[in-house]
Image (cartoon, rainbow, N blue to C red):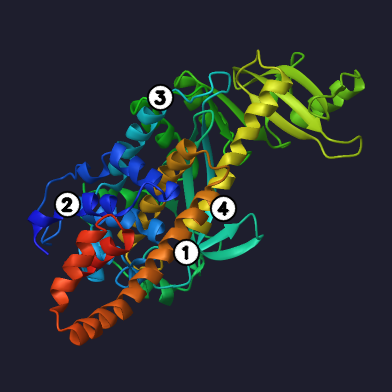
Amino acid sequence: MSQHKSNKVFSEINDFFSSHEKAVSKTMMVVKALKIPKIKFEPKNHWPEQYFRQDILLTLLLMPLFSIKNVAGYTKSTLHDYLQAGKDTLYRFKNESSIPWRKIAQQINRRVIKRIKQSGTQDTETSRCLIVDDTDLRKTGKGIEHVSRIWSHVAHTSLLGFKGLFLGYWDSKTFLGLDFSLHKEKGKNQKYPNGLSKKINRNQYKKKRLDPCPGHQRETELHLDKISSAIAMIKRAVVNKIDFEYVLMDSWFVCEKMIRSVIETGAHLIGMCKMGTAKYFFNGQQRSAKQILDSLRKDKKIRWNKHLHLYVVETLVVYKDIPVKLFYCRNSKRGNWHLLITTNTGLGIKEAYQTYAIRWSIEVFFKEAKQYFQLAKCQSRDFDAQIADTSICMIQYNIFSLAKRFSNYETLGGLFDDAKEFVLELTVCKRLWGFFLEFIQLIALIVDVDPDELIERILAEDAENKFVKLVQLNAA
């Protein structure tokens, strides 16, 4: 396939779908509106393939729309008929260290947010928030570059894989993935670096990346602590002019360094906090969270909040010279107390609790990204491919979330079910076409007519039929 034809890849795919398939056509409309076929790739180094990078990127992003789970399934799909590139071309693209995946995601995210603002569908009464959280990205191959054993706080055991740290954005109605970094864990046993034997570490796939290529930069993030990496992500969100009022996080990320960094952005922090040894200035003394709670309970400051169905006690304190507000909550008289902290000292418990509840949208993102977009399913040994695959999953999620928002689907699963049903229809049509060709040849033989002329007459009678469009595609 020559490069001059590559410019038509998107239009060919888009023209093939009729407006009756709402899920598919709406997603294609979003792709067109975001100008993904015009994404800029920097640096502009030599690309040895005969295909445009934009078309390869578009092909990878559209795979979920064609029910393709991975590159291996691409060659047997309808999508392959448009680009006609082999799977090795896609693999080489994902393995390339010079592709700036973070910049690509930022380009697309800016366009997504701009499109949302132009639509006028934002809820002005709901706070816009950044959300920080991590998830387990489980792998199966010990030979994967930089893979390590990680501790899963969900499974309460060690797993082979990466820790994926993500920054998300809640715009009042839709969750978008903004940024991420992959991390490895050293482990406590020096005899087993990264939780693996020295032999396994020595035999892992290794690739040399020259600074300052994007692949080398992502490789250095592996060894950063997650607090520093999360702060860097928040700063990049500010640089990209993401409009947010709060940064939400669980107790693993709340610390002095994080609180100060959030305040510097002009936003407020809301997060769960551990009932640990950290000291707060309260009533003229440095006291722990538990000591403060005991004092408040003694003074009978506990109140029942009928709106939230929680027992609540709140107080103003100073943490490391930073004024903060503490909310102690539990849902029954014998339940455990949970501590919520915010730098917005004028916030009430109802607003603080409801805003913090938005944090669960990132958990939904993790679940749906793994279920629909194959997040963490990549088993390539090349770390660049791991970055590429995670970036593609995040961008796919944002595209489909925007399509869902503009299509009035209640869930992302509903949109996927409709799209999948249509793709299955295409697969059946493609198989039927093989039988149809044999039937046409048989009829042409009986009536003594050229088969090609007979097909042309059929096409002329019904040029808008989806089945015929598939025929034209197969004949091209």
Query: Which label lies toward us, 2 or 3?
Result: 2
1 or 4: tag closer to the N-terminus: 1
Q: Picture quarter containing residue 475?
A: bottom left
Label 4: how many residues lie within 10 Å, few (<14), some (14-19) or many (20+)?
A: some
Callout 4–callout 2 Cβ contact below 8 Å: no
Question: Separation of disc 4 and disc 2 at Cα?
Answer: 35 Å
**Horizontal relation, residue 231 to residue 465: left or right:** right
Q: Amino acid at mark 3?
A: Lys
Callout 1–callout 4 Cβ contact below 8 Å: no
Question: Dot 4 corresponds to which residue?
Answer: 367
Question: Separation of disc 1 and disc 4 at Cα?
Answer: 22 Å
Query: Which label lies toward us, 1 or 2?
Result: 2
What quarter of the picture does the C terminus occupy?
A: bottom left
Which residue: 21% across, 87% down? 446
Q: Position of residue 244 (x, y in %)?
A: 48, 24
Question: Separation of disc 2 and disc 3 at Cα?
Answer: 30 Å
Q: Position of residue 302 (x, y in %)?
A: 87, 22
1 or 3: tag closer to the N-terminus: 3
- Residue 117 tag number: 3
Label 2: how many residues lie within 10 Å, few (<14), some (14-19) or many (20+)?
A: some
Q: Nearer the viewer, residue 241 or 433?
A: 433
Q: Position of residue 331 (x, y in %)?
A: 84, 35
Q: Amino acid at mark 4?
A: Lys
Q: Nearer the viewer, residue 281 or 73?
A: 73
Question: Dot 2 corresponds to which residue?
Answer: 8
Query: Which label lies toward us, 4 or 3?
Result: 3
Question: Separation of disc 1 and disc 3 at Cα?
Answer: 41 Å
2 or 3: tag closer to the N-terminus: 2
Question: Dot 1 corresponds to which residue?
Answer: 148
Query: Which label lies toward us, 4 or 2?
Result: 2
4 or 3: tag closer to the N-terminus: 3
Callout 2–callout 3 Cβ contact below 8 Å: no
